[in-house]
Image (cartoon, rainbow, N blue to C red):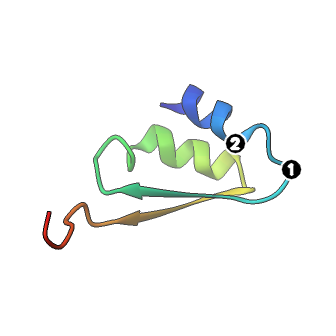
C-alpha cells in the first residue's frame, strides 16, 4: 500500500489529497504513519455506501 502511495504522490510538487473509502487497510497504522511522514499529502475517508448502489 505505501509503495503505491509513494508512486502516486511523488510526481507532484503540490499538495495531494487522497479520497478513500473506510476500508481498514486505508486507515491502518502503516498508512497513517506514511501520511504523517508526507505532510504534502492529506487523506479524507468517506463511507462506502452509495445511494442507489
Question: What residue occupies the far bottom of the structure in this picture?
Answer: 51
* Residue at x 39%, y 46% (from the top left corner): 26
Which residue is situated farthest in the right direction here? 13
Residue 30: % across, % down: 47, 37
Q: Secondary structure at mark 2?
A: helix
Dot 2: within a 10 Å radius of its alpha carbon, few (fewer than 14), some, or many (20 or more) residues? some
Q: Residue under circle 1?
A: 13
Tag 2 residue: 9
Return the residue nearer the eye: 14 or 34: 14
Most distant residue in the front direction: 52
User: 52 and 40: which one is in front?
Assistant: 52
Q: Quadrant of residue 3?
A: top right
User: How many marks on residues?
Assistant: 2
Residue at 30% over, 56% down? 22
Q: Where does the image place residue 12, in percent across and percent down from the top left?
A: 80, 46
Q: CA distance from mark 2 to mark 1?
A: 9 Å
Tell me if residue 9 comes above or below residue 52 in the rendering: above
Left or right of residue 26: residue 12: right
Q: Is residue 18 left or right of residue 6?
A: left
Residue shown at 66%/33% (left/top)?
A: 6
Amino acid at each position: 500500500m505505501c509503495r503505491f502511495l509513494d508512486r502516486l504522490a511523488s510526481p507532484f510538487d503540490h499538495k495531494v489529497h487522497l479520497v478513500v473509502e473506510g476500508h481498514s487497510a486505508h486507515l491502518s497504522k502503516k498508512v497513517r504513519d506514511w501520511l504523517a511522514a508526507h505532510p504534502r499529502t492529506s487523506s479524507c475517508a468517506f463511507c462506502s455506501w452509495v445511494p442507489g448502489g
